[in-house]
Image (cartoon, rainbow, N blue to C red):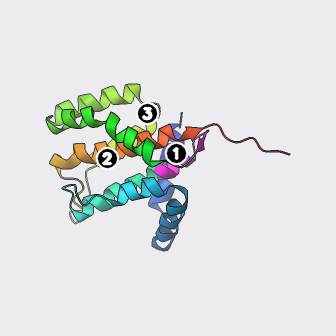
Amino acid sequence: MISFEVVTQTWQEMSQTPTHQASELVEQMSQEQPVALSFLLHLEDLPFDQYERELIFYIGMVVWQIMKRSGRQLYKVTRKKMRRAEESNVELLEQLASSDEADFIETIQLLLADCPEPEVLRYIVEAIMEEQDDPDEPGFRDEYKGLAFLHLKILLDAFVSSLGPRPRTVA
């Protein structure tokens, strides 16, 4: 299980990444996790505005970096694993679509209790629910927080299903 410290340290490092290195990270992800990158980039069918799409992409990149620091090896997410993660979250989508903020919070608390990577899921929740200090950065609109959460939870589930033992190194 990934610790709170690893999650916090990774998030802080990512928040300080210079703009010119961001494109290098995207290129690295296209090599290491092409299916996950594609999932993050294809949001046009969802009702997010440009700012929300960029936030989802950024949070997804942070989650990827956190998962790489797991004590286990992060293998490539396959289309099959991504599809399984989507299918396993259909019921959650239905719950979140018809819930108010109190129900949303209760659902999240239940998910945190059962999640194999609760600190990573907690980071996702906090990043989505975070109030923006800058009025030019509106954050997520309330009606789309649940959908953003679901999208990122699917990504996390796909990453979790792609963790395995680290290969042994031969001396």
In this picture, residue 60 sits left or right of residue 98: right
The residue that label 1 is drawn on is: 67
Residue at 51 percent across and 52 percent down: it is 65
* Residue 14 x/y as whole percent: 48, 58
Can residue 66 be seen?
Answer: yes
What element does badge 3 sit on?
Answer: helix
The image's mark for residue 118 is 3
Q: Are marks 2 and 1 in contact (CB under 8 Å)?
A: no
Quarter of the image for residue 38 reads bottom left
Q: Nearer the viewer, residue 166 or 3?
A: 166
47 part of magenta stretch:
no
Q: Earlier in the sequence, mark 3 or mark 2?
A: 3
* Residue 39 x/y as whole percent: 37, 54
* Residue 21 x/y as whole percent: 51, 70
Part of the protein shown in magenta: 64-74
In this rendering, the label closer to the viewer, 3 or 2: 2
The residue that label 2 is drawn on is: 151
Quarter of the image for residue 52 reads bottom left
Q: Earlier in the sequence, mark 3 or mark 1?
A: 1
Residue at 25 percent across and 51 percent down: it is 131
Which quadrant: the C terminus? top right
The type of residue carrying mark 3 is Pro
In this picture, residue 141 sits left or right of residue 8: left
